[in-house]
Amino acid sequence: MSDKRRSYESGHRPKFMVVVDKTPECARAVHFASRRAARTGASMVMLAVVDPPDDFEWIGVGEAMIEEASEEAQKLLDAAAREARNAAGVEPEQTIRVGSRSDEIMKLIQEDEDISFLVLGAGSGKEGPGPLVSTLGGRAAASFPVPIVIVPGGLSDEEIDALAG
């Protein structure tokens, strides 16, 4: 990965990246990122990560499980894209990856030098963004290649609109 992000060089636009999942807090992150992208002339990329199956690959079920999970992830991305369009007229890129969520986030940031911000919705549950926010907000935040924006899951659309500008 380059030491310098390219998002502010001529011909490049910064991107806000949102990790999309089933949690209600995800909608807060999508709303914030789309509003900020529209306000700043940036673009937006949404990532959904499918967990790989553990022990089912040897009987051919693994591929079917990944395909089914990918279809569900695409539905989540489509719903999040509608939210981005409705909130701010932003048409986000959509990406589905298979693997560890934190690994796939880092890989996408490394591959796309225009990604300037990672936007996460903060929740308190055991599933969804809560553990990811805790992990990235701890020691890992100091070495992360882009700023991490954490949007509290309890904010209303109006509060996010006011904060996003």
Image (spheres, grey):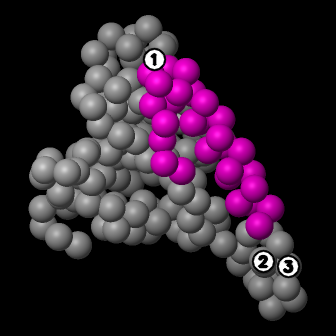
The residue tagged 1 is 155
Does residue 31 appear in this view? no
Q: Nearer the viewer, residue 151 or 138?
A: 151
| Total labels drawn | 3
Q: Nearer the viewer, residue 10 or 147?
A: 10
Secondary structure category for the residue under label 3: helix
Query: Considering only vertical position in the picture, is 115 above or below 25?
Result: below
Q: Nearer the viewer, residue 163 or 165?
A: 165
Query: Considering only vertical position in the picture, is 74 above or below 42?
Result: below
Reply yes or no: does residue 68 show up in magenta: yes
Secondary structure category for the residue under label 1: loop
Label 3 packing within 10 angstroms: few (<14), some (14-19), many (20+): few
The residue tagged 3 is 61
Which numbered disc, 2 or 1, marks the residue closer to the eye? 2
Seen at 40% across and 63% down, the residue is 108
Image coordinates of residue 63 in percent, x first then y, are 78, 77
Q: Amino acid at mark 3?
A: Val
Q: CA distance from mark 2 to mark 3?
A: 6 Å
Write the start and end of the magenta stretch as one range: 67-94
Image-quadrant location for residue 58: bottom right
Seen at 65% across and 41% down, the residue is 78
The residue tagged 2 is 63
